[in-house]
Amino acid sequence: MIYPFRSQGWAGWTQPRSIAIEGPMRAGKSSLAALLAHHWGAQRIAEREDNPFLPYFYRGEAGAAFAAQMWFLEERRRTLCVRPMPQEPGPVVADFLLAKDKIYANLNLNDEELAAYNRRYAQVTQGLPAPDMVIYLQASPRTLRSRIRSKGLRAERRIAEDYLEQVVRAYEHFFFHYTASNLLVVNTDTLDFVRNSGDLQRLLRRLREPVRGTEYFAPVSAQAASA
């Protein structure tokens, strides 16, 4: 079994014991987190997806953006801080990065709502450490729209094209400036870690090597190359 988590790696490199996976909606965060946790025998931290305010937000109802954002912030904090402790300490793979919460807050909230949100965010995040490494799953709006259609969730189908493009641009901006953890940027437009085991194996091999600062992983899927 591929298991890259050890306290000390080669050439003095300390390997990560906590990894967060990020990306816009339908980038594949939860699926990849589950696969990595399985292959590594790691504890998985999964974000809840049953935000009751999202359908109202996608319909454009007044106040729904603030309610949805605050729900996500509190649930993400709770998930990180109140999760069951494993029997033995070991590596952790989360399918979200709490710091990304501000991406959507800045996109969706008005000035008064954002001020209230920022006050609560400062309280919630005080003392919370950043993960050792973040895997950022890039995807174009076209790819995300295709995956949204495949997922078949009625609420998500209401997402406007221009909003999806804004989300992608906001993620790009956020991670272009992100320095709190080592960062591996993975372009997923031609990769499918769930249906193509070769894509997953290539990523697993890459993750056995050090990631220092910001690095990029954008191989062409064998399946895409033969198409």
Image (tube, rainbow, N blue to C red):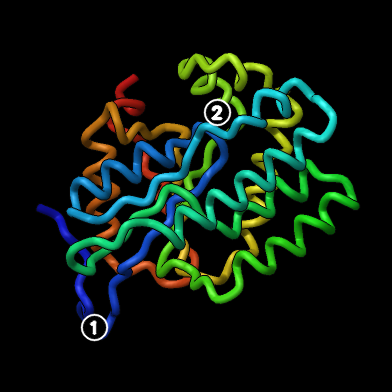
* Kind of residue at badge 1: Ala
Q: Which mark is residue 147?
A: none
- Circle 2 or circle 1, nearest the eye: 2
Q: Are marks 2 and 1 in contact (CB under 8 Å)?
A: no
Q: Residue at x 84, y 58 (%)?
A: 115
Q: Quadrant of residue 210?
A: bottom left
Residue 159 at x, y percent in the picture: 68, 23
Q: Quick one: which residue is furthest to the right in this view?
A: 111
Residue 134 lies left or right of residue 207; in this view the side is right
Mark 2 or mark 1: whose residue is earlier in sequence? 1
- In the image shown, does 41 or 63 lie closer to the viewer? 63
Residue 29 at x, y percent in the picture: 43, 41
Is disc 1 surrounded by few (<14), some (14 to 19) or many (20+) residues within 10 Å?
few
Residue 187 lies left or right of residue 13; in this view the side is right
- In the image shown, does 101 or 172 lie closer to the viewer? 101
Residue 178 lies left or right of residue 110; in this view the side is left
The residue wearing badge 2 is 144
Q: Residue at x 54, y 57 (%)?
A: 77
Q: Is residue 128 above or below residue 146?
A: below
Q: Which mark is residue 11?
A: 1
Identify the element where label 1 is drawn: helix
* Kind of residue at badge 2: Leu
Q: Is residue 48 above or below residue 141?
A: below
Q: How far apart are labels 2 and 1 at the CA level?
A: 39 Å
